[in-house]
Image (cartoon, coloured by chain):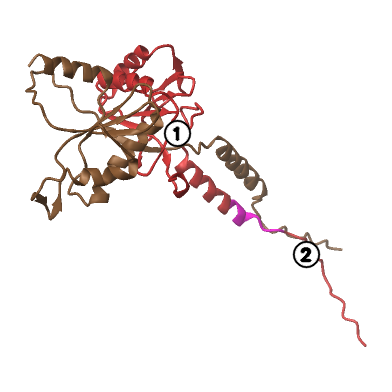
Amino acid sequence: MKLERRKVPPEIFTGSMADVTFLLIIYFMVTMAFSATKGLDFAVPKEETTQVQLEREEAVEVKVTPQGTYLVDGRPLALSQFADYLKGKVVPGKLIEGKPVIEKPVILRPDPQAPYGAMMDAFDELRQIKDKLGLARDLNISLPTQREIENLWGALGAL
Amino acid sequence: MIRIRRVGRKPDPYIPTATMADIVFLLIIFFIVTYNIEVDKAKVQLPRTTVRTDVPRDAAYVSVDTEGIIRVSSGKETSVPVSAVEEVQTFAQNVVAQTPDKPFVVKADKNTRFQIIDKVLDALKQARVRTIFLLSEQRTVSDKT
């Protein structure tokens, strides 16, 4: 009697591959950092080593108090009132591509005891002024450090 | 009535898993592409802002937690605590010496007094850091009270 051998169909077993890839997925999921990867950026002005010409320039000063409130040019204002106040600083008659501009620099000066969050709220609000007022360009916002302020006052005092 | 009986061997029960591997590989590719190594694990309550820009992946980190502990990382290894703000300047100078355009990220708790942030920013400015990012979370409608 002739015994016929049954042919086994050719097959690549992929069941274990799925196990391995699932393990890899679990590793990536566990070690993946869902951290914040965005923030407010600001370019640091280059420090000039050569002698610079200092001019007394009128600027808008935004102070952050230790309580987290704001003084804009000495007036207590809420964040929502910043845009209205700065509207008054638009250069009359000057338009760039049909849009108004504010040329005065804005100096953000938080008190050393002010909470960092309050400073960030003010900075964020100032960064939105361009869109809120439909300005041609962003406000010139500076965040001088205590050392820079002391150096500046020293230099201005020497004038 | 004639009873029809199926002749032959019963096929083995089989679940095809080949396509599952395809899906899983796609998921792996997604994780590899979006994978972001968290260099700084300091637990802070970030301030919330509306304006946010993407922080470059290779940025160096300086973090300040609620207790005022400062940690630094060049962006490649896990952050390490430093004992004084002066060390931040030295660290930043070394990083900038190697990569002059290296962006720095300041990750600080929103309740931290500005005094310490001021010192950190000053250290970075003195180290000639060109771009600084102040890390924040997205402000939502519920934040605007």
Q: Is residue B127 visible?
A: no
Q: Amino acid at mark 2?
A: Pro
Where is the N terminus of chain A found, in terms of image quarters?
bottom right
The chain that hosts pointer 2 is B
Q: Where is residue B128? Give x, y as percent.
A: 24, 21
Query: Residue reaching furthest right?
Result: B1
On the same chain, marks 1 and 2? The answer is yes
Chain shown red: that is B
Give the total number of marks visible in the rendering.
Answer: 2
Question: In whole angstroms, how far apart are the C-alphas of marks 1 and 2?
Answer: 60 Å
Q: Earlier in the sequence, mark 1 or mark 2?
A: 2
| Mark 1 lies on residue | B46
Question: Callout 2: 10 Å neighbours few (<14), some, many (20+)?
Answer: few
Q: Which residue is mark 2?
A: B11
The kind of residue tagged 1 is: Leu
Q: Quadrant of residue A146?
A: top left
Please give the range of residues in magenta.
B15-21
Q: Position of residue B77 (x, y in %)?
A: 44, 24
Percent of width and height locating residue B91: 35, 16
